[in-house]
């Protein structure tokens, strides 16, 4: 059970209704406190919901505006540095052209530094060539080394098998020749015949 002290200033109340007035004041104070707590919780929840909805609306609005506006932005572009003709192109096309030229223009030496015509470090490379040349060379070297090793192993295995077969065939032929099987069979037959006669 909880104990609490309530102070109430009641100047105008008769002593007969004091208990009832205290009861009313306590109940009114509790109701006000509970009401304030509920109101603050509801206000916080509403603020969070409103904030979430506003963020969604703002995000979708910004997304729409940026996609619409970016596609409408036009950039002046010269066909070449010698031309005076300027055309307006969409920013997406401009970015695509700049990206393509950055990838394909040969501006790097073989170490990835800026190439100049007096450079003694090799020829000109584009960014794409520079980035892929090492990778492709590594991949090809690895695969070629693997293929050479596999071919060497297969050649060694087939050579050993062929040598074994040839030696076996030669040994068999040599053994047959040394044993002189036809003569041996003839001798065996004549021995059988002689024993059969006796």
Image (cartoon, rainbow, N blue to C red):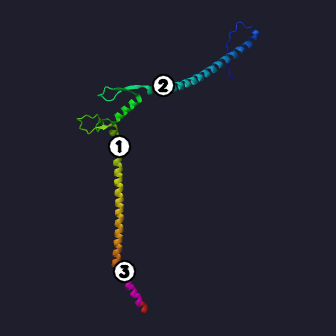
Q: Element at badge 3?
A: helix
- Label annotation for residue 65: 2
Sequence-first tag of 2 and 3? 2
Residue 196 placement, left or right of 145: right
Query: Is 88 in front, or is 112?
Result: 88
Where are the magenta residues, as a range? 184-194
Asked if the stretch drawn in magenta spans residue 193, the answer is: yes
**x 37%, y 82%: residue:** 184
Sequence-first tag of 1 and 2? 2
> Mark 1 near mark 2, Cβ–Cβ under 8 Å?
no
Q: Element at badge 1?
A: helix
Q: Nearer the viewer, mark 1 or mark 3?
A: 1
Give the mark count.
3
Picture coordinates of residue 99, whole percent (x, y): 37, 33
Determine the CA span between mark 1 and mark 2.
42 Å
**x 70%, y 17%: residue:** 27
Query: Quadrant of the image for the N terminus?
Result: top right
The residue at which mark 1 appears reads as: 135
Q: Quadrant of residue 33?
A: top right
Q: Quadrant of residue 75?
A: top left
Q: Quadrant of residue 112?
A: top left
Q: Nearer the viewer, mark 1 or mark 2?
A: 2
Residue 3 placement, left or right of 98: right
Residue lying farthest top? 12
Asked if the stretch drawn in magenta spans residue 35, the answer is: no
């Amino acid at each position: 059970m909880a104990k609490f002290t309530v102070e109430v200033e009641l100047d105008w109340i008769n002593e007969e209704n004091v208990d009832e007035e205290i009861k009313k004041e306590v109940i009114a104070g509790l109701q006000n406190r509970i009401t304030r707590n509920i109101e603050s919780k509801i206000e916080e929840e509403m603020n969070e919901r409103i904030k979430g909805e506003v963020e969604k609306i703002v995000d979708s609005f910004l997304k729409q505006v940026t996609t619409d506006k970016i596609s409408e932005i036009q950039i002046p572009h010269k066909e070449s540095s010698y031309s005076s003709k300027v055309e307006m192109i969409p920013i997406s096309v401009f970015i695509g052209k700049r990206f393509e030229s950055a990838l394909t223009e040969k501006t790097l030496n073989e170490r990835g530094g800026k190439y100049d015509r007096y450079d003694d470090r090799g020829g000109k490379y584009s960014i794409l060539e520079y980035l892929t040349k090492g990778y492709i060379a590594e991949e090809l070297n690895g695969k070629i080394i693997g293929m050479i090793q596999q071919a060497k192993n297969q050649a060694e295995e087939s050579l050993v098998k062929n040598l074994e077969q040839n030696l076996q065939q030669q040994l068999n032929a040599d053994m047959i020749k040394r044993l002189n099987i036809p003569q041996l069979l003839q001798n065996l037959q004549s021995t059988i015949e002689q024993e059969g006669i006796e």
